Amino acid sequence: MQNTQANPTATLQTVKQAISQGQLTTAQDKLDTLLADNTLVTGLKAECLYMRAVTHRLSKNYQAGLDDIASLIALRPDHGRAFQEQAYIYKAQGDDKAAASAFYQATRFNPALLASWQQLLLIYQQQGNQQAAVLAEQHIAFLQSLPKPILGAHDLMHDGQLAAADGVCRRYLQQHKHDAEAMVLLAEIDMKLKAYHEAEFLLESCVEIYPQHDRAAAAYLSLLARLGKYPQAEAFSRKRREQHPNDVAVMVAHASALVGIGRLDDAVKIYLELLEANSDRPAVWLALGHARKAKGDRDDAITAYETAIELMPEFGDAYWSLANTKTYKFSAGLIAQMEAQVDREELKLDDMVHICFALGKAHEDKKNIEKSFTYYKKGNALKHSTTQFDIARTEAAMNAQKEACPASLFASKSGCLDPAPIFIVGLPRAGSTLLEQILASHSQVDGTMELHDILTIASRISGQKTPYPFNLTSLSDDQCEQLGQLYIEQTRAYRQGAPYFIDKMPNNFIHIGLIKRILPNAKIIDARRHPFDCCFSGYKQLFGDGQEFSYGLEEIGRYYRAYVDLMDHWQSVLPGEVLAVQHEVLLEDLEGQVKRLLDFCGLPFEEACLAFHQTQRVIKTPSSEQVRQPIYKTGMGQWKPFESHLTPLFDALKQYP
């Protein structure tokens, strides 16, 4: 049925007016009409369901209200106001226990919901839960201390209305230029909008103006880690430790930054010091496991993850970290424990997602294919529902790269002529870590990690009058050289002094035009894998950050096609400048492909590259354990047992078994 309303957004405004005037039947009729339109976009549908639930509660039609809330939570499991409305209905029905649980969920997904915090405080006081009451009082005091526009912007941001929240913040800062809370909030919104350069500028300014502002400092450290700027994060967190020597959060942040720059022993020392003082710290055990895994101490990493689970049986990230070693096999007891956790209504959404992915892996290892796919599908659906990913926007961005980067753009070699960088690009789970390990085994090549510097430079130049990538043509030779030199300087901290170094950031395939403009002598290697294996492996992977395209079979198939199309473009406008290495061919002919790889990079053959699994180095990607083994082929064809479930992927790829 087509929506008869010309403008659903305008209709929603009239609905809000009707509710405020007590015209509940009128509001419900309009909402019924809007919701009858099955083409309504997710955001508007969620808003309609929420408002209809409100009208049902006000009309004392509680079950209808709960039904709408159930539909809304299925659509948006992280909708804080949905849980708040659910709590009000339970409270009206006299179900205080269910109301308490729903108010708690509301504050988890939207910490700006003051009314829910106030309700929780009353509940904690009635229960005599003094510790929880103190925490609630502190949060209420913080929210009440915020200027009303900033509190409103917090609410909008957590509700997913990023553009509206951004506008409120900017208007407030125009009148209150250096308000710390507004600066921190706007930076958080910018991070969600992936405007990282602006977020970094805001937080850098904020910590300079307000050096004692703990929330600004924590946000700044978090952003530096997200951007892979670990040297800056290490220096800043070290300074914070000098000022707050016994602050656990500051110590953990410093240890995390040390892991980022490869000083694993120093990081482990901090984690062990914290655990010696108090062993009941599951998050620290998890971080210790990550550090030990990166170092190659698999057994110690597993022990750390298992300890975290013993201390916190609902700790989803710890289960997933075990699964993410790729070699760990779950016991029947642990599988039963995970399944029991998934059935708990009060389990946090983030824990639910992690455990679903872990259960997918656990059942796949045991050949329980139907159960395995059920959990993979549920984990992906939940994760997808919390993102605002639009594959059409991504496809448009890749088409823009083709349009903005014709062959003429690369006619002259302007930029920084340093030949040191070797970029490995492609899709995640395509074998890029294996190529990195092979090259890092060469005496003239430094392995680093997934560096964010090209993405940061792209963000840095995207704020100009002509949007990126169309402004690549207007960059002067001097600008190109400066940007290339900036990249070389920023990445120096990750190198050990070899003539060449690897930058393995798969998503850099989108930015090859930028790379070749500012670093014309850089080598670029495209890690390519069979689409079925590559896409299904990505679908099974819960990524730490980004890669939102991987949480839907159709999305990941369309993304793969767009990637191949863009790589074909780079091959046509940069002939001979990009080497494609097919993963399956590498597995069949290791020596031949290694020699081809080294020839392309201008490197002499070294036997160590064939014995790559013996190379000791820090590896932080999901494939860390796999590349510490000799070549094996068990990863090929892992999609086949799941074939009957993968039709949306095949349709999107336009390829079939």
Image (cartoon, rainbow, N blue to C red):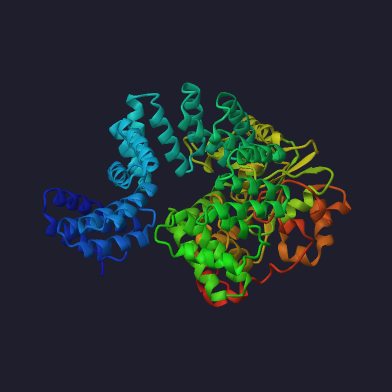
Q: Is residue 172 above or below residue 302?
A: above
294 or 604, nearer to the observer: 294
Residue 308: percent from the left, percent from the top?
Answer: 58, 51
Q: On the picture, is 312 further left or further right than 35?
A: right
Rendered residue at 75%/42% (across/down):
501
Q: Is residue 553 visible?
A: no
Judged left or right of residue 392, residue 573 is: right
Specify the quadrant of the image occupied by residue 415: top right
Q: Image point 51% across, 67% down: which residue?
A: 375
Would you say residue 249 is visible in this rendering? yes
Counting from the top left corner in percent of width and height, residue 279 is at: 59, 44
Q: Quadrant of residue 278?
A: top right
Relative to 490, does residue 30 appear above or below in the rendering? below
Q: Is residue 415 above or below residue 14?
A: above
Q: Position of residue 263 (x, y in %)?
A: 70, 38
- The quarter of the image holding the C terminus is bottom right
**Displayed quadrant of residue 586:** bottom right
Residue 90 shown left or right of residue 587 in the figure: left
| Quadrant assignment for the N terminus | bottom left
Residue 217 or 149: which is nearer the viewer? 217
Residue found 42% across the figure and 62% down from its top: 344
Q: Is residue 435 above or below residue 232?
A: below
Q: Residue at x 87, y 52 (%)?
A: 605
Looking at the picture, how far across and down is residue 169, in whole percent? 35, 34
Specify whether 490 is left or right of 119.
Answer: right
Q: Residue furthest top?
A: 209
